[in-house]
Image (cartoon, helix red, strand yellow):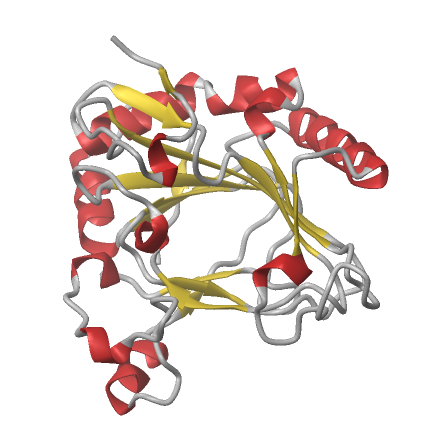
Amino acid sequence: MSTLSATASALLPAQIAQFERDGFLVFRNMLEPAACERMLQVAAQQLQEAAQPLEYEAELGYAGAPSSLEAEGGRTVRRLRGAYERDPVFRAWAEDPRIVDKVQQLIGEPVCLTLAHHNCVMTKHPRYGTATGWHRDIRYWSFTQPDLICVWLALGSETASNGGLRFIPGSHRLQVPREQLDDLLFLRPDHPANQALFAQGQAMELERGDVVFFHSHLFHAAGVNTSPVVKTSVAFVYHGCSNQPLPGTRSSASPDIRLTD
């Protein structure tokens, strides 16, 4: 897996081809340490205050999650939702030209930011932070085209040991039969045909300030956090302005922010 410099906004044709082939690009040191630290401070304070809106591990029902909000670990936060409006530091990052310019080159048209999906600070806590199986984000998004891009910022080290991302390169181009998916559209661990896909999974080794752009149709997963420290990331999602959310769906429940003309 090659990684890229974030010093210039313009992508090379080879980089665009890499995204089309693999479904993701990694940019090292894209955000300055001071901005990362400010985000961590804001996130830590809002976690301590339990500043709504929040998503709790107990609400997801994933394997190993607390059984209810009242159970031990039941108030373990999975996401600080609505990051765009939580603090100016998150809004500035969501609108950063280094992101927007690259997204526009990858999708080939003016860019909108959706506030309906991700738009959050993702946390993975020790002990109660659950693993996430192999899935595509587009499984619960509703747009005219399934072509959106998630921009994931690591605010600290992300490795296999603390629940870092894993990708199946090129899986955004695969047609996966319905029988290989469970009721929540995760790849079924018990299906023989999925074993070859799992074997292709790659762990993303990220450091503070590293950023991953990945396609909404790319299969990805994340393990549990076996470290003693909370892992914290920021995720925003972008789409072409002609690619509109379908009326009456969760994707249209929050406004889009048009970022380019």
Residue 89, quarter of picture: top right
Placement of the C terminus among the 4 image quadrants: top left
Placement of the N terminus among the 4 image quadrants: bottom left
**Quick one: 131 or 108, which is closer to the camera?**
131
**Whether residue 8 can be seen here:** no
**Whether residue 193 can be seen here:** yes
Residue drawn at the location 31% of the way across and 48% of the way down: 216
Percent position of residue 47, x then y: 78, 40
Residue 116, quarter of picture: top left
Percent position of residue 6, x then y: 42, 31
Residue drawn at the location 60% of the way across and 21% of the way down: 85
Residue drawn at the location 46% of the way across and 19% of the way down: 96
Q: Which residue reaches farthest top?
A: 261
Percent position of residue 217, x then y: 27, 53
Q: Is residue 39 above or below residue 25?
A: above
Residue 21 located left or right of residue 219: left
Percent position of residue 165, x then y: 49, 59
Residue 177 located left or right of residue 151: left
Q: Is residue 217 above or below residue 238?
A: below
